[in-house]
Image: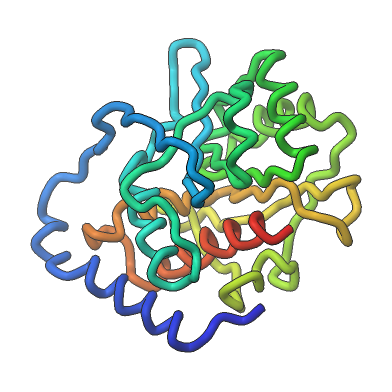
Amino acid sequence: MAVSRKAIATLALLLSTLATGASKLQAQRRGWRFAGLEPNVPYDGRFTFARIRYTVYGRSGWEFDYPTMERHLMAMMEEVTALRPHVRGSNIHTLDDPALLRYPVAYLSEPGYWVPNDSEIVGLRTYLAKGGFLIVDDFMRGEWRNFEMQILRVLPGARIERLDVSHPVFDSFFRIGSLDMSYPHDPYLKAEFYGIHEGNDPARRLMVVINYNNDIGDYMEWSDQGWWHVNITNDAYKLAINYIVYGLTH
């Protein structure tokens, strides 16, 4: 499904507005904006961004870019789609939280440090089997081995396959013509996109989409600060919106 020119123009205008004044803001020291957890949005059937919470060896990572990234993303979703998401609120869930099953799309950040316990393994397996869609983001070289080990605990025998631009997930709302991206803090690390399909059948539903050597959350979080070029930020929003629309329609 190709998106209309009006939606693309609206997205470009919003990005331009977010970047206004960037030259002055770039002179400020960039800092981490996490200020603590906010209350989850009570369930009312509207789309709510759901982020996965985990802790391992006293280190977190799941909260990077929270909650600014989801606020920006939901504002874009509200403007360019017919979806009426919660813009000012989002949810945090552990994988074994039964309430997670109410939310069809979930976001997992920094899986290079993610080590789920047995209960969380079963929770994610159940979530995916019941139609949930998982977006995996923000990890790079040296961190793949742990992610692969953990996701195969969830889905033994799963095939993690590289995706190219012909996959339907890249044409679910915006028609994405190129996957030429790089990791925000290392332009020499070229982004790669992977997926896990239901039953290991590429003709069936994509259950997990994996952004490797990439961090679309960071691009979106700082889109109002001018840290990243507007074109690459635009690409990050397009990918995220496509993922959500795909997850809601498959």
Is residue 147 shown left or right of residue 64?
Answer: right
Residue for point 40% across, 51% down: 86
Residue 42 % position (x, y)? 43, 35
Where's the N terminus, which quadrant? Answer: bottom right
Image quadrant holding the C terminus, namely bottom right
Q: Tell me what residue is drawn at x 63 percent, y 21 percent.
A: 96
Query: Quadrant location of residue 65?
Result: top left
Which of the two residues, 84 or 232, is positioned nearer the viewer here? Answer: 84
Q: Residue furthest top?
A: 57
Seen in the picture, residue 199 relative to 146 is either above or below; the reply is below
Q: Nearer the viewer, residue 164 or 120?
A: 120
At x 52%, y 85%, the residue is 4
Residue 234 at x, y percent in the picture: 42, 69
Q: Residue furthest bottom?
A: 5
Picture residue at 13% right of the left edge, 57% below the top:
25
Q: How is the image coloured?
A: rainbow
Q: Horizontally, is 135 left or right of 232 in the view?
A: right
Image location of residue 223, percent across then percent down: 30, 60
Is 154 left or right of 97, judged from the image as shown? right
Q: Quarter-wise, where is residue 30 in the image?
A: top left
Q: Is residue 197 above or below residue 203?
A: above
Q: Is 110 positioned to the left or the right of 21 in the image?
A: right
In the rendered image of this protein, does residue 190 appear above or below residue 132? Answer: below
Give the quadrant of residue 249: bottom right
Name the spot of residue 144 as percent of width and height, x first. 65, 36
Q: In this figure, what is the number of numbered marks?
A: 0
